[in-house]
Structures are given as C-alpha cells and as structure tokens.
Amino acid sequence: MSAGPLRLFRFGPPGEERPGAEWRRERLDVSGFGEDYDEGFFAREGVAGLRRRLEATGAALPRVPTGVRLGPPICRPSKIICVGLNYRDHARETGAAVPAEPVLFCKATTAISGPFDPLVLPREATKVDWEVELGVVVGRRARYVAPGEAAGHIAGYLLHNDYSERAFQLERGGQWVKGKSCDTFAPLGPWLVPADDVADPSALAMWLSVNGELRQRGTTADMVFGPAFLVAYISRFMTLLPGDLISTGTPAGVGLGMSPPVYLQAGDVIECGIEGLGEMRQVAVEEEAP
C-alpha cells in the first residue's frame, strides 16, 4: 500500500503553532525534532532531512489530535512576492494586456493566516475580492538562478487565497500593496506539499466558490509564466531566501471581473482548492472596533 505523499502542516493556537507532518497516513507532531518550518529549516536539510527523521523515528512520534486548529504551514517568511495578471483569462476579464514580463508586487507577511481562520473585513473596506492561487515555497537561497536550475530551488507548493481590497488597491493611489496586505488576506494551507510529491505543478486543477456558488475554475496550465521561470526571473531582481513565498496569480472569475462587480460581505463563506494541495474555507467577518 502506498504511504501517500508527505504533507507538512502546523497546528495550534495563533502564534503558538507547532510543526506537524502527515506521513504514512498519520498526522504526527514533529516539534520534538527541534525545528519549525522557517528559513533555517529550509536552508539546512529541509524536506529531505524531515523525511529521513520520519523514516527513523516516525512511528514513535505523538499523534496530532483531531479537531485541532491548523495554522499556516510555513512560519512567517521574509517576504511574499505575488505575480499579477499571470493567467491569460484573468488579464482579459480585467481589461489588461497579457504581460510581456511578470508583474511583481509584495504582500505583507502579517497578512498570513490559517486555512480555516476567519477573513476579517477591514473597517474601511467596500470591495474585498477573492483569488485562488498556487503558492511556491523557496527551498534554497536563489540569486541569478539559471532557468534550467530553478526547479531545484523549490521546496514545495501550497494553496493561497490572495484576498484583495480593490478600492485600496486601485483607487487610493500608489502601488497595489495597500489592497493586498490587510490582516488575514493571505490564508495558506492546509499543507505544504513537497515538490517531489507534485508530479506537474503546471497542470493542477483549481477552483473557488462563494456561498456554494462556483466563481473560479481553472488550471495552472493557463499560467503565462510557470513556477520555475518565476523563481529564476525574480532572482534577477532580489535574493529569494529559503521559506520565501511566491504566489503565482489567479484564473478568471474574480469579483472585479463580474458585470457588475461583486464583492464580499460579512457572513459570506469562501471555499477554494487546488488538486493535490487540499482545500480551505473562510467565513468573512467585520473587523471589531478597537
């Protein structure tokens, strides 16, 4: 019987998450190994070292209780680099040209949350939108990486819902980062799936629904620029550190592209998934007054 792919996750209360691993169909607490899924973990032995330790001692590790909260599967990385307009159909629905080079912007790491945590609508928000995306986690320091070597710098892949406040993003001046970086606007998970366990990251089905109504259905095959190309390209402009996250864009079906546009309200339920990487669910709630 196949043991199934290795899946990395983190569990526990916000800010107190511990590392776990789904291995041989068991969810194990691997905090006893002394490493969380941060820059140091990926810079040292990373996933390969975790596999060796699981083979040696996994059967003796404590099991993770059912029903425990799942947090983001990686610790807060040094940066999140997002790629805009990276699906041809999404570029068309927003009235933009397909870019000749990747459109890059940053998203604050304080936006990261767990895959089932609430989506908090900021106090001044009026146009909160959804975007199901494939996330790429960097496994090795990357600077001026050749395209043919870039895949070797990828530790694994995860699911990301790249929430956006379109008024902040497009109507308040400046760059997109204001509309992308609100707290809870980057739920990740439920797992990080190692690159070796993803047969073809450029051929994964993806979907998103709001209140049970399908809004996005696509495939990573429609990307303009694939994951390995993006690692090589971004490394020409900045150093990518182990554990950094690249979010690779979204297919058509966002609220901004609807006629008329449709945005999220308190009480809405947003669910999304990517083939082999799991599913997530958020309920939109109003931000509490201070």
Image (cartoon, rainbow, N blue to C red):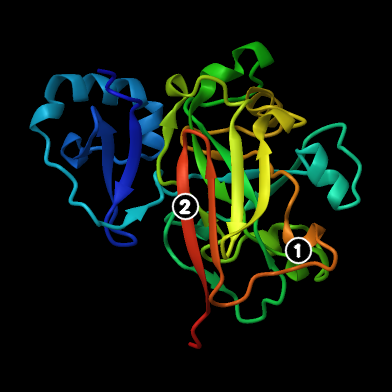
* Residue 44 is at least partly visible in this image: yes
**Residue, disc 1:** 169
Quadrant the N terminus occupies: top left
Q: Which residue does the image show at 80% across and 71% down from the upper left?
A: 172
Front residue of this view, candidates 43 and 18: 18
Front: mark 1 or 2:
2
**Residue, disc 2:** 280
Q: Residue 282's mark?
A: none
- In this picture, residue 68 sits left or right of residue 277: left
Image vertical order of residue 171 relative to residue 12, above or below: below
Front residue of this view, candidates 14 and 268: 268
Image vertical order of residue 267 relative to residue 47, above or below: below
Q: Which of the 4 image quarters holds residue 25?
A: top left
Q: Which residue does the image show at 60% across and 35% down from the upper left?
A: 205
* Identity of the residue furthest to the left in this view: 60
Q: Which residue does the image show at 79% across and 46% down from the upper left?
A: 90
At label 1, the amino acid type is Gln
Front residue of this view, candidates 111 and 162: 162
Q: Which of the 4 image quarters holds residue 9?
A: top left
Image vertical order of residue 51 relative to residue 106, above or below: above
Q: Residues within 10 Å of mark 1 (few under 14, many from 20)?
A: some
Q: Position of residue 111 (x, y in %)?
A: 53, 59
Q: Which of the 4 image quarters holds residue 196?
A: top left
Q: Residues within 10 Å of mark 2 (few under 14, many from 20)?
A: many
* Residue 45 is at least partly visible in this image: no
- In this picture, residue 63 sits left or right of residue 6: left
At label 2, the amino acid type is Met
Q: Earlier in the sequence, mark 1 or mark 2?
A: 1
Q: Which residue does the image show at 71% across and 27% down from the upper left?
A: 233
- In this picture, residue 71 sits left or right of residue 85: left
